Amino acid sequence: MKGIFDSLRKTRNAVFGQIIGILGGGEITAESWEELEALLIQGDVGVHTALLLVERLREAVREEGLYQTADLQRLLRKEIGALFPEQTDPLNLDWPLAVILIVGVNGSGKTTSIAKLALRLKKQGRKVILAAGDTFRAAAIEQLSIWGERVGVPVVQGEPGGDPGAVVYDAIQIAKSRGMDTLIIDTAGRLHTQHNLMEEMKKIRHIVSKRVAWGPHETLLVLDATTGQNGLSQAKHFLAAVDVSGIVLAKLDGSAKGGMVLSISAQLELPIRFVGTGERKEDFAPFDKDAFIQGLLGEE
Amino acid sequence: MFESLSEKLQNVFEQLGKHGVLREEDVKQVLREIRLALLEADVNYKVVKEFTSRVREQAVGKEVTQALNPAQQVVKIVHQELVETLGAPGRLSLTGTAPYVLMLVGLQGSGKTTTVAKLALQLRKQGHFPLMVAADTYRPAAIKQLEVLGRQLDIPVYSEHGRELDPPAICVRGVEQANSRGADVVILDTAGRLQIDTQMMQELETIRERTQPVEVLLVADAMTGQEAVSIATGFHEQVGLTGLILTKIDGDARGGAAISMRSVTGVPIKFLGTGEKTNALELFHPERMASRILGMGDVLSLIELAEESFDLEETARMEKRLRKGKFDLEDFLKQLRQVRKMGSIGELLNMVPGMKRALRGVSIDEAQTEKQLKRVEAIILSMTPEERRNPSVLNGSRRLRIAQGSGTEVQEINQLISQYRQMKKMVKNLNKGKMGRGLSLPKFF
Ligand SMILES: Nc1nc2c(ncn2[C@@H]2O[C@H](COP(=O)(O)OP(=O)(O)OP(=O)(O)O)[C@@H](O)[C@H]2O)c(=O)[nH]1
Ligand SMILES: Nc1nc2c(ncn2[C@@H]2O[C@H](COP(=O)(O)OP(=O)(O)OP(=O)(O)O)[C@@H](O)[C@H]2O)c(=O)[nH]1
Ligand SMILES: [Mg+2]
Ligand SMILES: [Mg+2]
């Protein structure tokens, strides 16, 4: 988690520094509330969630008779923390062949995250194989296959322009016959508003569920941390279509704070599983609530 | 969204009662809603702040025209101000001596490589000879991606395989090759990078210095949130942008990033990416974008047209009925007649929120439509007032009578009734588009 923390700190911008300055000392004034609201909204938390949080804080301050801005920080961390689950179960991978389906909008970081996840699982002793289910985008298959080589896991490939369902079907067969225990499926990026592509993705899911008991065991939605309020819409639609089981928040090494996962976590109760913190295969870490909140609030 | 925004505004004004001018507190309440709408659309916090204060200045004290109610009036001011902020659409400026170099830059995954191909295709259609340069040596298969696109479009790609050249060197060689390959435009596909990665940003500066592009275009994702401001500023300050391209606008993102990026850089928005296919590149229309950001379809243009050609009182009455979900065949007929006064059906339909999508791929034959409208009119005119108000009484024998009276077929009447039902449903759905915000807060401004 140190990696993400460092990169978050690296990118902390001056605005947040100032705000923390205001929140960091002295008495609570009308301005403190405004600054607080600004801080949250600028972190992409979303205006509704931001106002909700501010309102809760106001209540707490009233009830507890607090007047120091230092207390606001503490309260805020607590309230944001409460939007995430206390604890999340580990990934549901305890199966002879665990299947992980990776979905998301165009360019969010799916293929790269798959490589990172594959490496991580491999290091845990799992036998991982990948399926190049994006047969649509130019050179998407080559991209995954290069990543496969880099992290040392095999990749099942089809033809460009071919049926992704067929690739998934083959991958399941090959995974079983080679005694692999983890299959990660890459899919083409698609906007959640594209009906046909969402149907195609359901079909892929269906193929898995027919061939592998209780599969896919995890369906991870990869979100770009730079995304604003559309993230919630993405999560809702993908959840409805393929029963997403968790979120990967990629590109958290940028200047964006990824605050939209707050409402995703609170409203949809989806666990945030991993964060992507760079373009290298090791730039990946399990989601750490506290580090995330610190990043969001721009703290050291 | 439009419905809920305008409905909210409507409520604000109904509570206030009617005044001759927009008073400070009217404007304040309206601006509160506008502010929420803009923030929800991902317009940057500070940009929203500046924006609303500009609108406040403009709106306070303005006389309420007879044509629009106060809510509509403020929405109109907001819309105009948004359009102004978004600025006029930019065009590529291919001036000076060929080859003209276009350089595309942006964050990882924003759509640069795809947009390089889209631009090349569009330029070729305009009679140019583009050459694409694969200068992303970092991302796995990035070069291959551009090569595949080049092959699909039959547009040449310059790439380095054997030798280890750095991206600036590749770009320089690409530009050098333009002449021998007969290309007059060179489009550079650079690797995605974070604006805070100073080393990678330095690379872009070097490429810029060594290739002297006529355009440096920031390719940004329409779904971008609050950071749009730092991203655009970061690229603009370090590389110097000449234009913006917003991609993935085919989704349901409201696209507030457009406002943020434009207002902090001052460079024009030149194109919109509207899909994954290489022909999905469109010119930017500030009016449409403003409506989208406000979540209102092109309703404003509709309001304007209405101002010009609608009977105002009639419009207000109709709006009320629509809002209440009351909508009978008499209204249907009146709508039809007013709509016909207003202009081409195709144009009008495109302005109705949601219609554009529903009608995608449908081409409208104006003459044919006109003829059909006449028949519909005849049918409705052959109905009794009671039948028009309550179409559910239209049984078989009544339909037969109407068919004979209007010189049409029963089938056409059936069709009309089913169209009317659909329309009614649509109106209902439009009215239902509520946001459901479970919060009302004491202080906002
Ligand atoms: N900085 C940063 N870049 C990332 C991260 N994850 C992915 N990227 C970059 O984002 C870009 C897109 O990543 P991909 O993995 O190709 O995204 P994708 O979702 O598979 O894209 P499509 O298949 O085209 O929809 C690439 O340039 C990646 O190197 C991350 O955590 N941080
Ligand atoms: N729906 C939609 N998808 C788009 C659009 N433009 C690009 N894409 C998709 O977005 C993803 C990323 O596009 P790329 O062109 O690879 O993006 P890039 O900026 O070159 O990515 P890097 O080189 O990794 O930084 C791909 O899946 C594209 O097909 C668009 O306008 N609409
Ligand atoms: Mg991919
Ligand atoms: Mg690229």
Image: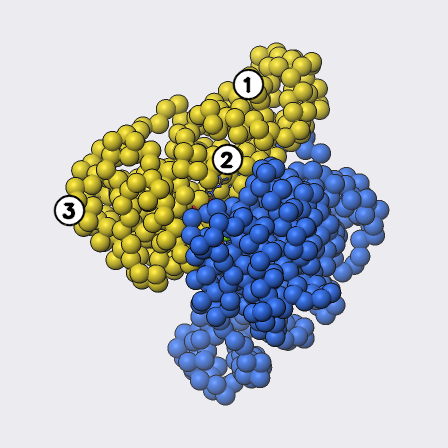
Q: CA distance from mark 3 to mark 2?
A: 38 Å
The reply to whether residue B51 is visible in this rendering is: yes
Front in this rendered view, residue B269 or B255:
B269
Q: CA distance from mark 1 to mark 3?
A: 54 Å
Report the residue at 50% width, 35% height from top. Answer: A252
Report the residue at 58% width, 58% height from top. Answer: B173
Q: Which residue is mark 2?
A: A252
Q: Is mark 2 within 8 Å of ligand 1?
A: yes
Residue flagged by tag 1: what amino acid is it?
Leu
Chain the render paints yellow: A
Q: Which residue is mark 1?
A: A75
Q: Earlier in the sequence, mark 1 or mark 3?
A: 1
Report the residue at 61% width, 21% height from top. Answer: A58
Q: Earlier in the sequence, mark 1 or mark 2?
A: 1
Q: Which residue is mark 3?
A: A177
The reply to whether residue B432 is visible in this rendering is: no
Q: Say few, some or many: other residues with alpha carbon within 10 Å of mark 3 (under 14 / 14 to 19 / 20 or more).
A: few
